[in-house]
Amino acid sequence: MLGPELLQQMVDVVALIRQRMKTAQSRQTSYANVRRRPLEFNVGDNVFVKIAPLKGVMRFGKKGKLSPCYIEPFEILDRIGERANQLALPPDLDRVHNVFHVSMLRKYLSNPSHVLRHEALDLLPNLSYEEVPVQIIDRKFTVLRNKEIIFVKVLWRNHEIEEATWETEEEMRQRYPDLF
């Protein structure tokens, strides 16, 4: 059996632990709130939606990604809670759910002089699309102790030359033999 002094000491220790955890949680929240910018959209606003282009090249067992893109302005039909919005999507995106978190949206400020280039993309249900290589820009050799690895710099469709990536020539020959 526990004595009353020991029991009171344990209650005090638990109260101290709770108080320290609350202090740490408050500190973490204040750090996070400084870095987070408030995003809020109204009904009728136009927003861009973020999509992720996948290269389709397996690198160390994972699919590589290029920098995310934002596609055409969509109108917000309804706000669902504080952080979600329902968008008016065109019929070619009927496979994609039309409710998005604000982190996937970027505000579009309309300007009559804007000319938006629209390219039809074949989007997957997870808002990604398969990228296709256009051409090989450069080639380099890396010499290891007992073998030589050849890398090629690949320019991908829908991306600028600054976003070209280095891939191994062997993988590119297997996946895209018509490129060589």
Image (cartoon, helix red, strand yellow):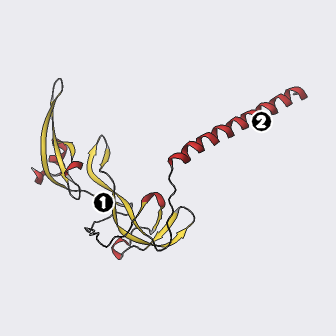
Find residue 36 and name its label.
Answer: none
Along the viewing direction, whichever of 106 and 130 lies nearer the viewer: 106
Write the residue at 53% across / 69% down: 79
Q: Give residue 105's quadrant in the image.
A: bottom left
Residue type at numbered disc 2: Ala
The CA distance from mark 2 to mark 1 is 52 Å
Find residue 15 and name its label.
Answer: 2
Residue 96 shown left or right of residue 42 in the figure: left
Write the residue at 11% across / 54% down: 178
Q: Quadrant of the N terminus?
A: top right
Measuring from the top left, give residue 153's x and y in whole percent: 17, 44
Measuring from the top left, give residue 77's x and y in whole percent: 48, 74
Residue type at numbered disc 1: Tyr
Measuring from the top left, give residue 128's x and y in whole percent: 34, 59
Measuring from the top left, give residue 89's x and y in whole percent: 39, 73
Q: Give residue 70's quadrant in the image.
A: bottom left
Q: Give residue 131's quadrant in the image.
A: bottom left
Q: Earlier in the sequence, mark 2 or mark 1?
A: 2
